[in-house]
Image: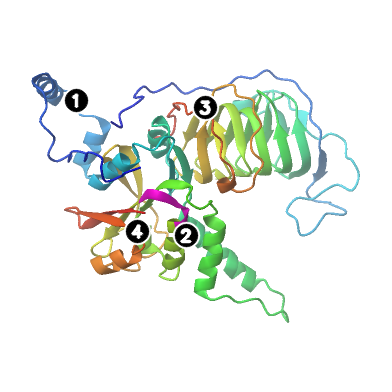
Amino acid sequence: MNWMAKARPSNPATPAKAPASAAAAATSRATEKPGPAASMAAAGNVRISNALKEFLWLLSDVPRARILDLGPVWQSTVTFFIEKGYRVSSEDMLREWKDFLTTEEERLRTTPVGEEPERRSLPALAEKFIDNALNYPEESVHGVLIWDLLDYFDPAVVPALMNRLYNMLHPGGTVLALFHSRSAERFHRYRIMDGQTVELLPAPTLAVHTHVFQNREILDLFGKFRSSKTFVGRDQVREALFIK
Amino acid sequence: MWHKNEGKPSPEVPQPPAGGTTKSQVTPEAPAASTVAPAPVSVAPTPAPMAITPEPAAAAPPAVGGASRIQAGLKIHGEISGNSDLYIDGELQGKIRLGGARVVIGPNGKVQADIEAGGVTIDGSVQGNIKASESVRLGAGSHVQGSVLTPRIGIDDGARLRGKVEMIKAGSTASASTTATPAAQVAESAPRAIAASAKGE
């Protein structure tokens, strides 16, 4: 599929010219009660995501695309993709990583006296974790939602994660990632409300914000990918899309 | 271009008929004379009498009145089949095939099994592939590792799912995949719209 030959989606902030009838309908809608997404936008816990819109556009030509969400599972996100005919997989990577480390610590702690437990370096642990957590065939996934997890993962995990994601992605597949330009004030999880709206849900902190990625670091991280696009929001969160 | 299928189907709760058969080996948790250590599920050395008995209606949980129950503190290793509703609050390892009946995994329930039923409600832990011909609901305290194939799914906030969700046609009776990892399973059934019945949705 030629991803680049497709018509670009219009920017939600600058809608394309609409016919007169559509304009009249829009005027009519303006007087109606705002929908839930609009209400939440007013409350400040959603963000309009240009990257999400482009992510969906890139997938729109793929029949029954397989989406991998690396955040927690949400009804709204699953429903959104299923209604498009996509297949959805969910792997709450940050929580799984935390559980994995807890299990490893427990294993070391409970090793009987006299038996030397097998100790593994953090990169080795990361490899083991990724092997287990992302056990998907090569080139089987068309879209990956990383959200802002890379900011929170231990740096030892990130290279292994990126390698695995690249191998899992179908050629032309795309990754959506968010990066904080400064340390995040609190931990959020993300769920999709509609084609361009993401809700931010404050959540108990699973991990500390370990690293603020600079632009060059981000590009290096996704160095194998053939194309990238970045959107910077007013909230100092950078949205990035990468195409394999 | 992405505003397809905007209609929202209504949530559905299946009401399968009661009655059926089960076959399993059951041991009480406490006095296990010869358990298979360190496996989490103990296995009776000899076939034990049936322990999955229909409870009086008053004692049954409201969601599955009249269902067979595996109480907390029981461990079962084996296959459960039939067409009776089933409530599991203990531990089960093996296979569950209940046709169009309904399976409820309680908050203490720990299931390591592929589940094939009409409706599946999970508030505990399940490791295995789930196929429901009617609906699946993942409660807030649920932890599922495996694939979910169903025409309708409800996911409460706080549910944990490691695996994939795929839509199948309602009433589909094809066997669920028995592969352990979500990656190894690729079902090519037609997608269907699903019911959004989660809390706060």
Q: Residue A70: in sight, yes or no?
A: no
Q: CA distance from mark 2 to mark 1?
A: 45 Å
| 10 Å crowding of disc 2: few (<14), some (14-19), many (20+) | some
The dot on residue B151 is 3
Q: Would you say the magenta stretch is mainly helix, strand or loop? A: strand
* Residue B152 within the magenta-colored segment of the rendering: no
Which residue in the structure is indicated by mark 2?
Answer: A164
| 10 Å crowding of disc 3: few (<14), some (14-19), many (20+) | many
Of residues A133 and B57, the one drawn nearer to the viewer in this rendering: A133
- Same chain for mark 2 and mark 1? The answer is yes
Q: Position of residue A217 (x, y in %)?
A: 29, 68
Q: Earlier in the sequence, mark 4 or mark 2?
A: 2
The dot on residue A33 is 1
Name the front one of labels 2 and 1.
2
* Residue A168 within the magenta-colored segment of the rendering: yes
Name the front one of labels 4 and 1.
4
Q: Residue at x 55, y 60 (%)?
A: A131
Q: CA distance from mark 4 to mark 1?
A: 43 Å
Name the front one of labels 3 and 2.
2
The dot on residue A17 is none
Q: Of helix, strand and loop, which one carries label 1?
A: loop
Q: Earlier in the sequence, mark 2 or mark 1?
A: 1
Pointers 4 and 2 in contact (C-beta within 8 Å): no
- Name the amino acid type tagged 4: Phe
Above or below for B173 versus A223: above
Which residue in the structure is indicated by mark 4?
Answer: A225
Q: Residue at x 14, y 41 (%)?
A: A13
- Same chain for mark 3 and mark 4? The answer is no
Q: Earlier in the sequence, mark 4 or mark 1?
A: 1
Q: Range of the magenta residues? A: A167-174
